[in-house]
Image (cartoon, grey):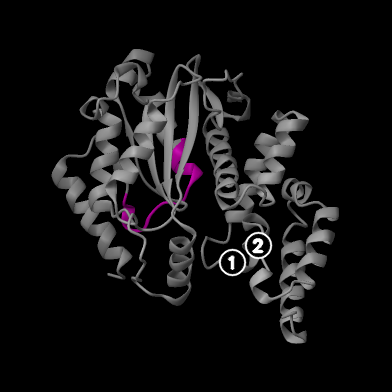
């Protein structure tokens, strides 16, 4: 049924809020330009039902701050300021369409992640260090390259996208303060999904001298008890999973939604590239700056022992349960 008068007024007020939030964000205002906003407003106000009212994630942030800290949209604005001037018209249009929601939720989330990473690496290395490689037919397209000590390092993001039902249940749980919920998805807690996602990406042909893989899962499952040790091993000892030496990543970052859990470097790849401690920690700093820090100083890395890692996992779980 069409929107009733009161709900239509609510939608109109939300659209006004979204538009107003772009007034001091010229890069996002160019992505969600005046013509798009006019057409989107008309579609939403004439939606067939409340279930048909939707907003692209970045555009909707002013009235969805329950999910992200208040500066989230500003971070995307800064990331857009780094990337947009570097893109040709075709690449720019592709990014804009993804930000507007074309291609579905996974394309939209990956576009946001691209902007966040660009912001983090530009903050650490400068915007001039970021470039876009020529990609061959047998190569995946990374988010971008960053030049470190003369090496073009591939920054590649991979999202572990759960089923729509799982993502909606998770959003509802966050909104209502629930600590758990039930899903009939048979794969929701399967650690094999995480292992397969990382291994599959590592086995693709890289475009740079080395690869930094950013793995993001968007719901709390897989649990950190399983996820953290697995990602650590895939980063520091990938041969254990039959990943050939030439496919080993320089580093793997593990992110849950937009909160960073850890970054693990591979010592052999660091040595092969001739990177020093400062280079390594600058890259770790760029990855940390791209996302939000967890409560309780929770952050995992390759220099931690098993006991420290176990204590930190316990802290992470306790905080998640309100402790």
Q: Is residue 164 left or right of residue 59?
A: left
Query: Residue 98 — which label?
Result: none
Q: In the image, residue 86 lies at what x, y percent?
A: 70, 29
**Residue 248, x across and y down, in percent:** 34, 23
Q: How many marks?
A: 2
Residue 63 placed where, x, y %? 63, 68
**Position above or below: 229 against 240:** below
Residue 243 position in % (x across, y down): 29, 24
Q: Which image quadrant is residue 250 in?
A: top left
* Residue 113 higher or lower than 151, as above or below: below
The residue drawn where x is 18% and y is 53% is: 311
At a point 47% along the width and 52% down the height, the residue shown is 258
> In this rendering, would 230 be left or right of 140?
left
Q: With respect to residue 49, does 256 lie above or below?
A: above
**Chief secondary structure of the magenta portion:** helix
The answer to whether residue 113 is above or below residue 236 is below
Q: Are marks 2 and 1 in contact (CB under 8 Å)?
A: yes
Q: Can you say which quadrant of the picture contains the C terminus?
A: bottom left
Looking at the image, which is closer to me, 310 or 228? 228
Question: Which segment is the magenta one?
Answer: 286-298
Quick check: 52 left or right of 123?
Answer: right
The dot on residue 60 is 2
Q: Which residue is mark 1?
A: 64
Q: Residue at x 30, y 32 (%)?
A: 235
Residue 161 visible to an observer of this rendering:
yes
Magenta span has 293? yes
**Which quadrant of the figure has residue 43?**
bottom right
């Amino acid at each position: 049924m069409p929107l009733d008068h009161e709900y239509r007024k609510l939608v109109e007020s939300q659209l006004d809020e979204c538009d107003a939030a772009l007034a001091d964000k010229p890069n996002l205002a160019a992505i969600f330009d005046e013509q798009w906003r006019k057409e989107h407003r008309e579609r939403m106000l004439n939606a067939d039902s409340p279930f048909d009212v939707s907003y692209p994630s970045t555009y909707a942030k002013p009235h969805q701050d329950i999910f992200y800290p208040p500066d989230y949209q500003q971070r995307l604005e800064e990331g857009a300021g780094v990337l947009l001037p570097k893109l040709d018209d075709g690449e720019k249009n592709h990014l804009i369409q993804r930000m507007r929601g074309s291609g579905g939720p996974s394309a939209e989330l990956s576009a946001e992640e691209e902007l966040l990473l660009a912001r983090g690496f530009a903050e650490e290395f400068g915007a001039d260090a970021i470039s876009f490689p020529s990609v061959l037919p047998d190569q995946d397209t990374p988010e971008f390259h960053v030049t470190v000590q003369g090496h073009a390092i591939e920054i590649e993001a991979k999202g572990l996208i759960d089923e729509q039902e799982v993502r909606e249940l998770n959003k509802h749980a966050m909104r209502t303060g629930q600590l758990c919920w039930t899903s009939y998805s048979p794969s929701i807690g399967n650690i094999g999904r995480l292992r397969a996602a990382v291994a599959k990406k590592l086995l693709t042909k890289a475009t740079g001298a080395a690869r930094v893989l950013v793995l993001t899962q968007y719901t709390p499952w897989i649990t950190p008890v399983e996820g953290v040790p697995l990602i650590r091993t895939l980063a520091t000892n990938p041969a254990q999973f039959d990943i050939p030496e030439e496919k080993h990543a320089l580093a793997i970052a593990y992110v849950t939604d937009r909160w960073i859990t850890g970054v693990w470097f591979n010592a052999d790849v660091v040595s092969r590239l001739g990177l020093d401690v400062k280079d390594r920690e600058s890259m770790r700093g760029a990855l940390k700056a791209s996302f939000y820090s967890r409560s309780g100083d929770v952050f995992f890395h390759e220099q931690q022992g098993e006991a420290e890692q176990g204590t930190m996992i316990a802290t992470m779980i306790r905080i998640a349960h309100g402790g």
